Amino acid sequence: MKRESQMYPRYRDLPIRSGLPPGSSWEVFGSGDEIGTLNFITEEKTRDAARLVESGRVFNLDLPLDVPDPPFFARAPYRRTLLELGEGIVRDDVIDGFFPQASSQWDALSHFAHRRYGFYNGVRQDEVTGESGSRLGIEHWAARGIATRGVLVDVARLCEARGERIAPDRHLPISVSLLEETLDSQGVALEQGDVLMLRTGWLAHYLAATPELRRTFAPEEGSPGLSAVEEMAEFLWDHRVAAVVADNVALEVQPTGKESGGSLHRRLIPLLGMAVGELWNLEALAEDCARDRRFASFLVSSPLHLPGGAGSTANALALK
């Protein structure tokens, strides 16, 4: 771990003072902080990450905005209207019913509160949703942008190589030990300010399915993802991960519940202020990484500059 990460407390030493929620990073980055673990991305980190670009290959990590179709979690497909001003002149699309978190997405820190302790850094509900509320909105990430080292952790490929195919409809918690085994097999280590990009293989199954079969997918009833146990939060925090994203619908294993460690979202977003992304299209990047054995890339993302937004399209590229 780099020396610069030593300025931050380890997970076992959280919180930094009495009266704050257990397992929380509240006030580590300041009492008024609104970007959370993106603070781990320093200017030096961005410069170092940019030097990873050698071949010039660029990978778009976003799905088309109309995939998945239909969207999950009771979201509806958007409707678009193309405006024509006359022959040869087309104006902006009008998009109705657009859910920024229906496809490849970021979850803002305003997206999820802890049932007991509330939003990250003690922000109140009315500060998030009130008439003048925009605390913890996605615009705070948009204003700084995200440019850092992305590390692909291709758990699906490792399991397939040893004959243990991950079923897309199975409740399979991915453990810390499996993440560590995958990183070791790839010959790459996590560093402060990295974005961990987890490939479970779920999206590959979805994209290979027919439109009729896609409509039968119910990932909330059973799908692979990160284990929600406290050890996972400790692993991510102690490696100073700036964000963790995945190719599945909810990052963590589905369904959630006490039998699977509770809710990882509640451990990461409101308690640690950690950036979370879901439904990222890692397929082309994964093929390239498997080919050249370079699992780190320069990751850039520009979230929507949407005041008070609870999430955003990913708008993410990986450059090698």
Image (spheres, helix red, strand yellow):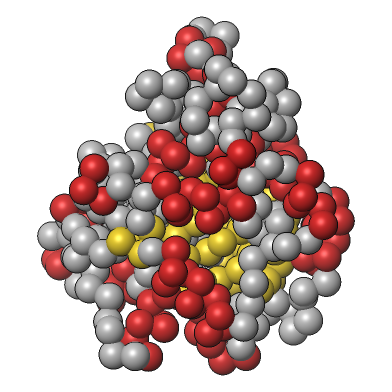
Which residue is more in the foreground, 64 or 320? 320
What residue do we see at 61% from left, 68% from top? 151
Q: Is residue 80 left or right of residue 23?
A: left
Q: Which quarter of the figure has residue 8?
A: top right
Which residue is more in the foreground, 274 or 292? 274
Which residue is more in the foreground, 252 or 138? 252
Above or below, 171 against 270 in this view is: below
State the quadrant of the N terminus: bottom right
Which x, y percent locates residue 285?
54, 76
Q: Is residue 30 left or right of residue 12?
A: right
What residue do we see at 19% from left, 65% from top? 169
What residue do we see at 35% from left, 56% from top? 227
Q: Which quarter of the figure has residue 54?
A: bottom right
Q: Is residue 310 left or right of residue 98?
A: right
What residue do we see at 48% from left, 41% from top? 268
Whether residue 310 appears in this view of the structure is no
Which x, y percent locates residue 196?
56, 61
